[in-house]
């Protein structure tokens, strides 16, 4: 007998029929003799609808009240799933994040999990009940106010519960069959991966793969929670995310897949004086504007004038704000110019042991060059090679790399209608 | 500086515009220097919509989960009102029933308030905040589960908070100008009452007046909470409900008003043997079917055969169930027949000191007889005379009594469109 945590997103519970399907799957797991904990997001567009209602009332609603409002969504969906399970003859009880012992920081709209006290859930499980927990929410340790967890909140809720309850697996249900070697909508012969390590999944998530949130994977890695990404429309085993890169003997590089990201923009701070502290000044300014930075590139300074260019990528939507923020320190830092380029795409090859195999980097560059794609910036880590290219070349880049590294298989990947990632 | 509790029902917060109007009124009270606590029901038809969603999932949803589901409604409306207040520049924080320290029994769907610990609310008020509390809900002391309070739950929440916080007044906002000497839609010259005692209000509520729930009035009386029933569309003072009958010197009877009720049915258990325990058997059977009984009449037994008839009134909708329940004890009790009559109306005259003034009873009967209305049953208390007549004669009965006791005034009562009582 195992303890299984299952997480279902908003589209899986968007109406009464879908909710009943979820209930059937949950009850099947229970009938196999497992303890089952289910994390459910709000139904369909509920969160957006509630946010819209709030905007009708006020353009800048207080964060505490927005959290009180939005958490109603998960409360509703969890109670309904519990009812559906009950209608199938099994015991089920729903709990809010706060009732589930999910303690967080006080930052409304973007709280972090600080601790999980699953005692009440454990008792319910011991009494034979299936347990539902509202995702995306918790309670601030300090103020006792209800908080929402920000992006990736529901996945993270599921992983945090799995860790606290020492679950055997945390299953994340989605609308694709698992993690693929590339986005199946771009690369028709992309392969479903049997399993990937935490580090590879982290890199893929950071590189654009959208199935699992980075944050949830980080949490899983820290507490060694096995994750399984599965499709809610079928019974395929999906992809297991577990284990660490270090455990894999590295005679040959193991290449996992190609990830891509269209959502970024690129800023170059041109002609930064190569003086200590200038880069720090730049990044502190961007951080103070609460903008996340992804890739950073700084090459050596020019011999002619001791200046260098610093390039970084960030979410496109934050580009204009970042530029405004940096304009304010132009004089102090003394850079020459700011260039914001929103038309960039990032493509990444993820796998183990690439640093030890320079042939991989060479093949990478050759593959792109062979299809006429110019590499604008390049950036590598132990298990990832990423480049920036023009966004309209991104699909070609993904296909070229997937082919060059022989990641394709014989089966055509199935793409479900409505897979809107 | 006073502490004011204000309660607003679902129609007062049915959309963004109404919510903003409520916020304006609340902020006005705060600007007068008072501490303000606001209890809000769910928006418009939300509770019905959620119940409907539950029915789509299951015909008999578990009560615990129904409470989890329905309480989302008040959560949403309270957060939105808090946001609207904030948009007007005042501080506001919303709290669920559980966060507000509302402790209840464990009976889902019909919990009773056991205790109120308003510490967190008091702190928020001391910090200068307006406080919003979700009505109709609390937390079970035993199971720590969220509960809903059943009929009259929101009014009762407001009164309970007012009691716990020692408020100076609890204002119940509705769509009429206050408590009237009769329903203004039936009696055009019905008068708004300046004030009524708790006992009179109890009798009026029990007799059919729908503005305040009996339960909330009982709670107010027990803890001496002054209530004020006011209209949310204007600034009229409404009606004060406070004080006790005993405080009023009774030289002459003081007549408050005429109440009516169309929602009842009448059951007569014919030919009950006049043996000890028979009546008890009958009422225990009805009580076990969880049916509320209103008026009970048993006259002396017939000399001819030692049998009597027992008549009682109950909600029409429970009539058939009560009859079925009583059929099962027909043999044991030995009654002759059961008659269920749904076409009854109850009309009541409420006021102080009627028992000491038999002229009142006489005038009462004469007034009805003069308009050809037959009194089918009669039942009196210290401050109320009630009769059952045909439901289609009810309006005439109300007008006749109101006129006979000179309760009308010079002003025409204003009836607001949409006053759906």
Image (cartoon, coloured by chain):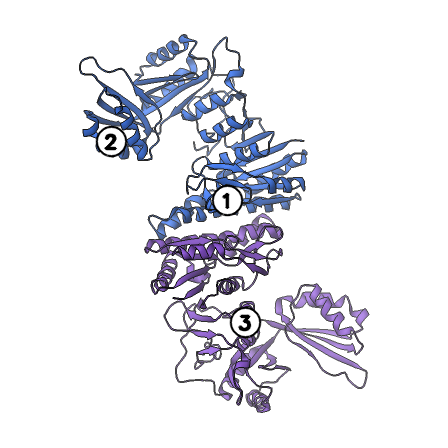
Chain colours: A purple, B blue
The answer to whether A267 appears left or right of A196 in the picture is right
Helix, strand or loop at label 3? It is helix
Crowd rating for badge 3 (residues with CA inside 10 Å; few <14, some 14–19, many 20+) = many
Q: Real-space Cα distance between discs 1 and 2?
A: 39 Å
Q: Give the vertical position of A14 relative to B401 (above or below).
A: below
Nearer to the camera, A83 or B9: A83
Q: Which residue is mark 2?
A: B326
The answer to whether residue A55 shows anywhere in this view is no
Residue displayed at 19% across by 26% down: B334
Horizontal and vertical percent for residue A74? Answer: 48, 55
Q: Which residue is mark 1?
A: B74
Q: Quadrant of residue B95?
A: top right
The numbered mark at residue A221 is: 3
Crowd rating for badge 1 (residues with CA inside 10 Å; few <14, some 14–19, many 20+) = many
Q: Give the position of the C terminus of chain B as an image quadrant.
A: top left
Q: Give the vertical position of B381 relative to A252 (above or below).
A: above
Are labels 3 and 1 assigned to the same chain?
no
Horizontal and vertical percent for residue B254? Answer: 48, 13
The answer to whether B360 appears left or right of A286 in the picture is left
């Amino acid at each position: 007998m195992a303890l299984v945590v299952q997480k279902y997103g908003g589209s899986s519970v968007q109406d009464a029929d879908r909710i009943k399907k979820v209930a059937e799957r949950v009850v099947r797991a229970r009938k196999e003799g497992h303890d089952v904990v289910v994390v459910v997001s709000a139904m369909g567009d509920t969160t957006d609808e509630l946010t819209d209602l709030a905007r009708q009332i006020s353009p800048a609603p207080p964060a505490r009240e927005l959290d009180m409002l939005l958490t109603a969504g998960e409360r509703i969906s969890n109670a309904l799933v519990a009812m559906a399970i009950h209608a199938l003859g099994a015991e089920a009880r729903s709990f809010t994040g706060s009732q589930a012992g999910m303690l967080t920081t006080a930052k409304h709209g973007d709280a972090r999990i600080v601790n999980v006290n699953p005692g009440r859930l454990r008792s319910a499980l011991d009494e034979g009940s299936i347990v539902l927990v509202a995702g995306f929410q918790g309670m601030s340790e300090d103020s006792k106010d209800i908080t929402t967890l920000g992006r990736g909140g529901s996945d993270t809720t599921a992983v945090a519960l799995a860790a606290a309850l020492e679950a055997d697996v945390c299953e994340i249900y989605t609308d694709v069959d698992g993690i693929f070697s590339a986005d199946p909508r771009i690369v028709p012969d992309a392969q479903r991966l049997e399993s990937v390590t935490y580090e590879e999944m982290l890199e893929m998530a950071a590189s654009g793969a959208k199935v699992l949130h980075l944050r949830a994977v980080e949490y899983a890695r820290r507490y060694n929670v096995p994750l399984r990404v599965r499709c809610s429309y079928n019974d395929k085993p999906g992809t297991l995310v577990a284990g660490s890169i270090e455990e894999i003997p590295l005679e040959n590089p193991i290449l996992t897949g190609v990830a891509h990201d269209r959502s970024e923009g690129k800023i170059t701070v041109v002609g930064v004086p190569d003086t200590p502290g200038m880069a720090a000044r730049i990044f502190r300014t961007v951080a103070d504007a609460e903008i996340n930075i992804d890739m950073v590139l700084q090459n050596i300074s020019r011999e002619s004038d001791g200046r260098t260019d610093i390039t970084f990528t960030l979410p496109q939507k934050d580009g204009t704000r970042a530029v405004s923020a940096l304009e304010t320190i132009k004089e102090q830092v003394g850079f020459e110019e700011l260039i914001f380029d929103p038309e960039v795409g990032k493509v990444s090859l993820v796998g183990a042991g690439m640093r030890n195999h320079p042939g991989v980097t060479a093949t990478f560059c050759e593959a792109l060059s062979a299809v006429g794609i110019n590499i604008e910036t390049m950036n590598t880590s132990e298990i990832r090679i990423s480049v920036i290219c023009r966004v309209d070349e991104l699909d070609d880049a993904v296909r070229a790399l997937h082919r060059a590294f022989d990641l394709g298989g014989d089966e055509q990947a199935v793409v479900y209608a409505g897979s809107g990632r």
